[in-house]
Amino acid sequence: MIVGSATAAGAGSFHLPAALGALWVALWIQVGTNLANDAADFLHGADREGRRGPLRVTAGGLLPPERVWRGAWLAFGLACAAGLYLVWLRGWPLVLVGLGCVAAGMAYTSGPRFGYRGLGELFVFLFFGLVATAGTDFVQTGALRAEAVAAAVPVGLSCTAILVVNNLRDIPTDAAAGKRTLAVRLGAEATRLLYVGCWLVALVWPAALRSMGLVGERFWLPWLSAPLVGHAAVGVWREEEPAALNRSLRETARLHLLYGALWALAHLP
């Protein structure tokens, strides 16, 4: 969201109400997706005893799945309510985008269950990278711009890296539950390579965009995160214990925020 607003600002079209509206929509879609995933994983048996990650609401017995589902629908409803303002601002095509995001959030672990079929990483890259970033730019500039789509790619890759390390940690329990994530399909070693690949492309991407004239002279700013990326990659490559991979997961999430902030600064006027 920050990068999308930065690209809009770089084009001289920053619009605070639209930026806040897009942030509100994205926030509640994220909450709804997480809650739906929490309940669905419990019902499908993916969150069983011995799970390696932090406590989850349904599996931990904090709330029954029915109430978690209601919370998911409430979150999606709040996202749609804010989305009405964006539709008023930029037109009815955003209805399709919003409904598509909600449907994808529900389908991640319910219905088609993308997350169970090895498509979770693609889902995250598309919706939390391309759609979120280019969409935030669109609601402010009124155009789907090549600069915004290109800027969204490393955002999606760094976000995907979070899911990659999460699924790496969960390979044994996911495989036992029949959850065929991409990590289960690839195996641990190839999943580690995928993690490294996400970050390598994210770090090389700014130079490629600079060569095409799609980013300004501060294109190098994301490279300031390279030492921390290297540290995280070494940790993911070496560690196998759940506790260590949980640390890598938190580190990757922080890196995603840091990279995004630096990439946003690179696009500001």
Image (tube, grey):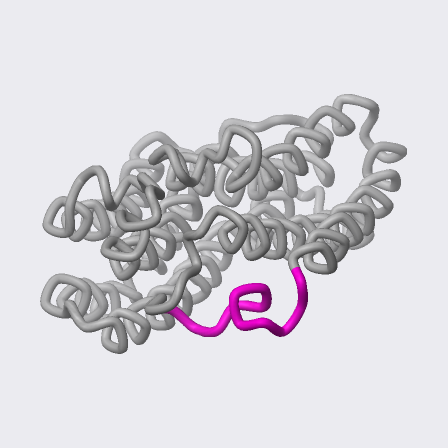
- Name the spot of residue 239 as percent of width and height, x first: 14, 70
Q: Residue 183, located in which quarter of the rendered image? A: top left
Left or right of 60, for residue 65: right
- Name the spot of residue 221 as percent of width and height, x first: 36, 60
User: Which residue is at 57% across, 28% downward?
Assistant: 145
The magenta stretch is 53-64
| Main secondary-structure element of the magenta-colored stretch | loop
Task: Please state which of residues 248 and 114 is positioned toward the viewer in this rendering.
Answer: 114
Count numbered badges in the picture: 0
Residue 54 inside the magenta-drawn segment: yes
User: Which residue is at 43% across, 73% downward?
Assistant: 54
User: Which residue is at 37% across, 57% downward?
Assistant: 162
- Name the spot of residue 3 as percent of width and height, x first: 54, 51
Left or right of 203, for residue 28: right
Residue 256 inside the magenta-drawn segment: no
Tell me: residue 240, above or below residue 108: below
Task: Please state which of residues 252 and 212 is positioned toward the viewer in this rendering.
Answer: 252
User: Which residue is at 49% across, 51% downward?
Assistant: 41
Q: Residue 207, located in which quarter of the rendered image? A: top left
Task: Please state which of residues 222 and 106 is positioned toward the viewer in this rendering.
Answer: 106
- Name the spot of residue 89 as percent of width and height, x first: 86, 35
Q: Residue 181, located in which quarter of the rendered image? A: top left
